[in-house]
Image: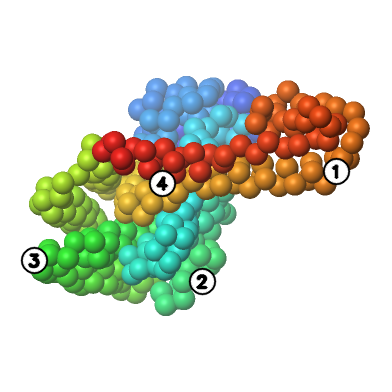
Amino acid sequence: MPWLIVSTCFLLATAALSQAAATNSTSPSELLANAPECAISCIVDGFMDGGCSLAKAADCVCTNTTLQAHVSQCVQTSCIYEDQVAAAQISRDLCRGYPIEDRRSSTRIPAIVLPAITIAVVLLRCISRIAVAKGMWWDDWIALVTTFFLFASGVIALINHRIGFGLHYWDIDPGKATTILQVRRPLDLLRWLVIANRSKQIFYAAQMIYVLVITGAKAALCAFYARVFSHQRFRLATNIFLTCLAIQTPLFVFLIMFQCIPIQAVWDRSIHGRCLNITAISYAGAAVTIIEDLILIAMPIPELMKLQLGLKKKLAVVFLFGFGSFAIIASIIRLKYMVMFSRSYDPTYDFFEVNLWSGIEVNTAIICGSLPALFPLLKKLPGFFKALKNTLEGTWRKIWNISTPSTGAKQTWGAGTSASEAPKEDSHTSTIVFVESPTETEVSMASSRESRKLGI
C-alpha cells in the first residue's frame, strides 16, 4: 500500500533525526513505532498535510488544533476503541508540556450558577405557597420533583468536568476517558450517578435526565394553568396537553435507554450491536419541545385577554411571556448546535454549546413556571420588613426603659437615632419619658383610610 511505503520512509527519517526533536523526551519515530497499525496512515497523512518538518514535528502538531482534529477524526473512523485509546496516548506523549485548549471553567460556571438560581426560585415558590395559600398544589410538587432531577443533572455535569469534559477528545487522559459515567442498571438512579465507564455515558445519562426535566417543567406549568383558569374548554385543552406529555415522556426515555441492543453497545464501540438513529430521535425530540413551548405560551392568551388588568399586572404578564419566549429561543439555538454536534468527532469539546443551551432552556422553563407563585411573596416582603423594623424598635424601647434609671443625667443618643425614638425630659422633673410615635403600619392604615374616602 502507498501509505505503508511512505510511513516506512517516515520512520527511517525520523529515526535519523530523533535527536532534533528536543521539545520532548520521546522522539516521533518511537511514537510511531508504538502506534496501532490502523492509526499510522492517519498520523503520517496528518504530518504531510500540515507541512510538518521532521525536526519540529511536535511544534507543528501540538500547536495546530485543526491538524489534531483531522488526525483524531481519521483514527476514530479507522480504528476500534482500544486502538483509539492507544493512539490518544501517543498524542499525549508527543504533546506533553504544550498548552491545550480548556473549556472546563466555562462549562463549570453555568453548571453551578443556573441550577443554584433555579433551586432558590423553586424553594421560594414553595415557601410562598405555604405562607400565602397555606399549602402546596400539584403544580408545586411537580416543580419540586423536576428540580431534583435538575440537581442530579448538575451533579453529573460537575463530575464530568473534573474528568475532562471541556477538553478536546485527543487531550483527555485515556485512563480518564473511560470513567465518564456508565449506566448499567436503568432502574437504579443512584447507580446511574456513581458508576463509571465509557466516555459516551455522559450523553447517555444526560439525554434521559434532560427529557425528565423539560417534561416536568412543562407539566408543572400546564397544571398551574388548569388550576387558575376554570373555563371548561381550557381545562380540556390542558388535560389533552398533559396526556400527550404522559405518553411522549416514557416513549422518548425508552428510545434513548434502549437505543442499542445490547445497551452496552451505546458506550462500548467494540460491541457490534443493533442501534437506532439517535440523531434523528434527538431532532424529533427537539422539534416536539419547540412546538410544545409555543403551545404553552399561546394557551393562556385568550383567557388573559378577557381579564381587566391594571398597568402593573399587564407589565407582569408581559414579563412572564417574554421570559417564557426566551426558553423557546434557547430551544431553537440548542437544536442548531445539536445539528452541528451530530457531525462532530470531538464530542467532549463540541458538546459545550449543546449542554449550555440545554441548561438555559430547562432552567428558564422551571423559573418561568415558578414566577407567578412568587408575586404574592414579593408583595408581602415590604410588610414583613416593616413589621420586623417595628418589632426591633419596640424591643429597643423596652430595653432602654429597663436599663435607664428613673433619675439622673441626661442620656446621650447616637447619631443614628431618630427624633421620635429619643427620650424627652419632662420640664418639671428629671425623669426621662419616652414619646411613642405611631408605627409606620398605623400611619399606612390611616393614610389608606383617607385615600378610600377620597376615592383614590
Identify residue for label 1.
403
Q: Are marks 1 and 2 in contact (CB under 8 Å)?
A: no
Secondary structure found at label 3: helix
Identify residue for label 4.
379
Residue at screen point 19% across, 61% down: 229
Q: Tag 3: residue type? A: Arg
Mark 2 burial class by Cα count in 10 Å: few <14, some 14-19, many 20+? some
In x, y percent, where is residue 343? 27, 45
User: Which one is earlier in the sequence, the residue at label 4 or at label 2?
Assistant: 2
Q: Nearer the viewer, residue 410 or 305?
A: 410
Quarter of the rendering containing residue 93: top right
Q: Which mark is residue 191?
A: 2
Q: Are marks 1 and 4 in contact (CB under 8 Å)?
A: no
In x, y percent, where is residue 360? 36, 45
User: Which one is earlier in the sequence, the residue at label 1 or at label 3?
Assistant: 3
**Residue 282 in sight in this render:** yes
User: Which one is earlier in the sequence, the residue at label 4 or at label 3?
Assistant: 3
In x, y percent, where is residue 342? 27, 48
Q: Nearer the viewer, mark 4 or mark 2?
A: 4
User: Which one is earlier in the sequence, the residue at label 1 or at label 4?
Assistant: 4
Q: Which mark is residue 233?
A: 3
Residue at screen point 54% across, 65% down: 194
Mark 1 burial class by Cα count in 10 Å: few <14, some 14-19, many 20+? few
Q: Which mark is residue 88?
A: none
Q: Nearer the viewer, mark 1 or mark 2?
A: 1
Q: Tag 2: residue type? A: Arg
Which of the image's four quarters has the C terminus?
top left
**Residue 78 in sight in this render:** no
Residue 320 in the figure: left or right of residue 134: left
Q: Are marks 1 and 3 in contact (CB under 8 Å)?
A: no
- CA–CA distance in space, label 1 to label 3: 68 Å
